[in-house]
Amino acid sequence: MEDDLFKKIETEYRKLDRRWLHYHFRLTQFAVFLMFFLECAIGFIIYKTGNITTSLNVYLMKFLIIPTLFNTLLLVIESLGLKSRRLSQKGKIYLVSLMLLFISFNIFTVHGTFSSLFFIFTFPILLTAIYADYTLITLTGVLAIIGILVSELFLHWDLDKPTVWSDGLRLSNFIISLFILVSSYFVGVIIIYFEKAKKTAAWEKEYERYNLLQKIQIDELTGTYNRSALRGAIREMESDSSGSVYVYVMVDIDNFKRLNDTYGHPVGDIYLKELCRIMKQNCGDAAVFRYGGDEFSLLFKNSPVEDIVRCCETIQEDFASLDLEGAVDSSVTLSFGVARYEPGMKPSQLIKNSDEALYKSKEVKNRITVFKNSLLLAMV
């Protein structure tokens, strides 16, 4: 049960990561389109003011066409990766994060004249913090620092761009940019640390709530669900609009009072526990409930009635073959009442139908009765 809870929580976290992954990709697209339009606007302004130091064709090729084609290629790779069934969700997260980093590197390299553009590297770093992955944010941070070092020290896409050694101000800006990138990385790591702490606290609270709920819904003696849990399962059945078929089965131990009177209640408790073990062992995904005393119920979902009847027969056989030293009573058998839930039927009617079928079985004992068409009771 604890594993099921953990899986449910992990599934919810993955859903949130998928949602953020979608927005992350959209932000990357927006950044590419925004830079394209800004390039056009800047080019138009520079052209009108006569500040272009090279021919218009060279300017368009270096600062508009090639950078845009490179960014578009990265977007295509990103889009194909997100659609790929071979790539895991984690792989897609890494892909989108690194593509945004490469786009930032492209923009910074092309427009290195504007030293303040180093801030563009902080976005890929901080946006990855949402995924709470130390490896990813470290990889992004290291590559961002390498990117700014390579761009500033070795690449000269814009020939008008001054080098970091040209004056003290440019060198100071370069050092400050490295400091801010490192700081951004540590800020992201701190965010991840507290996000993980919040998740851990939320998990502990959910686990406590889950355990409390289990205690409330579990029968202490048999370990099966109790009547309170049955009410919850019935409500879920009523609200299920998926077209699933439900079958409700009531189970009663024949001559149980005589067993208790003859051998004592401790032996009766052993029979109850053994019956629950047998039902859980043979009923697959069906939920087992203790209805009260020596009466139990089973709720099957999307199982044919014929299969359910065979399951009940197997339970009867296993129960009859119990080997309890000094407490074997062949008159202690099982009776079953089986009823199918019809859409729109009131839960009280479903239980009544199953109870009527059980009553018919109890008249003979050790029988399985299927309630049909509100009139016919078929004995098995």
Image (cartoon, rainbow, N blue to C red):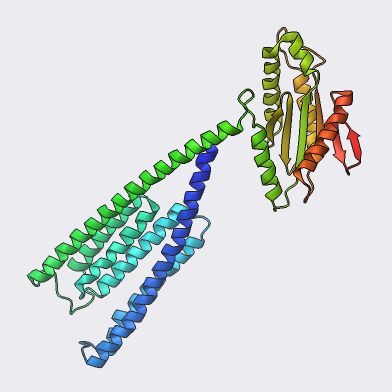
x, y percent for residue 193? 32, 47
Viewer-nearest residue: 316 or 338: 338
Q: Residue at x 55, y 39 (%)?
A: 4
Q: Residue furthest right?
A: 376
Q: Relative to residue 236, is residue 369 depicted above or below?
A: above
Say which quarter of the image contains residue 158: bottom left
Residue drawn at (9%, 72%) of the image = 166
Q: Which residue is at 79% across, 13% downward?
A: 258
Q: Which residue does the image show at 44% across and 59% down from the upper left?
A: 20
Marks counted in the figure total: 0
Examine the rendered structure and indicate whether residue 62 appears above or below residue 311: below
- Residue 323 shows up from this direction: yes
Task: Answer above or below: position of 7 versus 290.
Answer: below
Quadrant (top left, top right, bottom left, bottom right) of the N terminus: top right
Q: Is residue 138 visible?
A: no
Q: Position of residue 214 (x, y in %)?
A: 56, 34
Q: Position of residue 88 (x, y in %)?
A: 48, 53
If the image is split into quadrants, where does the C terminus sit?
Answer: top right
Residue 190 coordinates in the image, percent (x, y)? 29, 50
Q: Please identify the residue farthest to the left as the structure is shown.
A: 168
